[in-house]
């Protein structure tokens, strides 16, 4: 399992706690606003918005919140103006870190993220310093009780997917980024419910960390994840499964 997948597993465990603090809703609302601003407010004609709305409904976000976020994105309601920025750097033990943020104040975000990197034994780098170590990949989760392996293979491959892997109670349909919307739509058309779906940065090679080094890496990623502006976080660390369970308990 890659560092990306392991970090995703930890985030799933934190989801309930984050939801209580409203962090999940905040991130989803910002994604809906940006998707609406860039592609319009019609989800049928805007795949990114459709994906964001599906994610919001999956977290039981009220329909009124979704509508207001769309209207703010299209400029029909007043609201903060957000921009997307990607930061790259290194964490403890030389692990590569990519942070995608959505902010209404670029200077504040740069200053705060630089502080978090430095405080936790890392350093913020220039654009491109670690992104070459990752490849973009589409992943769509489907619960095992929602569809069988053969059915998903047939639908996924027909829509441009490259692989189907098993992760716990879910199947994960893996595709090149340009096939993401086609795969999501094919599953929707087949009335197959999907979980999280995203275009992510997946590490090509992993850096093994253990003991105190593993703990410092997780602490840094946790500090970055807790920042209000952070939307997505990727790293190329690798930790033994048993040690990961102990550290993330």
Image (cartoon, rainbow, N blue to C red):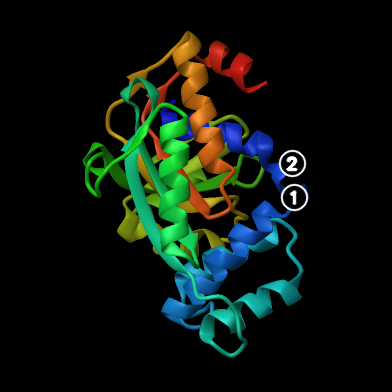
Of all residues, the one furthest to the top in this rendering is 211
Say which residue appears at 50% left-offset and 77% top-offset. 36
| The C terminus lies in quadrant | top right
**Which picture quadrant has residue 225?**
top right
Residue 194 or 216: which is nearer the viewer?
A: 216
Q: Is residue 96 visible?
A: yes
Neighbour tally class for label 1: few under 14, some 14-19, many 20 plus, Cα within 10 Å: few
Distance Cα–Cα, label 2 vs label 1: 7 Å
Residue 172 or 192: which is nearer the viewer?
A: 172
Q: Position of residue 203 (x, y in %)?
A: 32, 35
Say which residue appears at 26% left-offset and 39% top-offset. 130
Left or right of residue 221, residue 159 in this image = left
Q: Is residue 161 visible?
A: no
- Position of 98 relative to 198 (above/below): above
- Position of 240 relative to 108 (above/below): above
- Position of 25 relative to 88 (above/below): below
Neighbour tally class for label 2: few under 14, some 14-19, many 20 plus, Cα within 10 Å: few
Say which residue appears at 45% left-offset and 11% top-offset. 210
Residue 186 or 241: which is nearer the viewer?
A: 241
Secondary structure at numbered mark 2: helix
Are the residues flagged by discs 2 and 1 in contact, CB closer than 8 Å?
yes
Say which residue appears at 74% left-offset and 42% top-offset. 16
Secondary structure at numbered mark 1: helix
| The N terminus lies in quadrant | top left
Q: Position of residue 121 (x, y in %)?
A: 41, 26
Residue that label 2 marks: 17
Q: Position of residue 170 (x, y in %)?
A: 58, 38
Residue that label 1 marks: 21
Of all residues, the one furthest to the bottom in this rendering is 76
**Which picture quadrant has residue 53?**
bottom right
Left or right of residue 228, residue 122 in this image = left
């Amino acid at each position: 399992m890659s560092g990306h997948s392991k970090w995703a597993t930890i985030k799933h465990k934190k989801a309930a706690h984050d939801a209580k603090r409203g962090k999940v809703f905040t991130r989803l609302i910002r994604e809906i606003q940006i998707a609406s601003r860039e592609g319009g407010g019609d989800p049928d004609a805007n795949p990114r918005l459709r994906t964001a709305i599906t994610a919001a409904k999956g977290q039981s976000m009220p329909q009124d919140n979704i509508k207001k976020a769309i209207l703010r994105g299209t400029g029909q309601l007043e609201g903060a103006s957000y921009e997307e920025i990607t930061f790259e750097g290194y964490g403890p033990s030389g692990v590569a870190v990519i942070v995608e943020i959505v902010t209404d104040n670029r200077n504040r975000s740069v200053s705060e993220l630089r502080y978090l990197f430095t405080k936790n034994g890392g350093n913020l780098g220039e654009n491109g310093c670690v992104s070459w170590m990752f490849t973009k990949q589409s992943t769509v989760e489907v619960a095992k009780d929602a569809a069988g392996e053969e059915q998903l293979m047939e639908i996924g491959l027909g829509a441009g997917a490259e692989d189907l892997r098993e992760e716990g109670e879910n199947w994960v349909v893996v595709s090149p980024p340009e096939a993401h919307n086609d795969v999501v739509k094919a599953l929707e058309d087949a009335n197959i419910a999907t979980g999280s779906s995203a275009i992510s940065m997946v590490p090509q090679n992993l850096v093994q960390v253990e003991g105190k080094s593993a703990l410092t890496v997780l602490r840094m990623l946790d500090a970055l994840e807790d920042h209000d502006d952070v939307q997505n976080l990727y790293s190329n660390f690798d930790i033994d499964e048993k040690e990961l369970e102990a550290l993330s308990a």
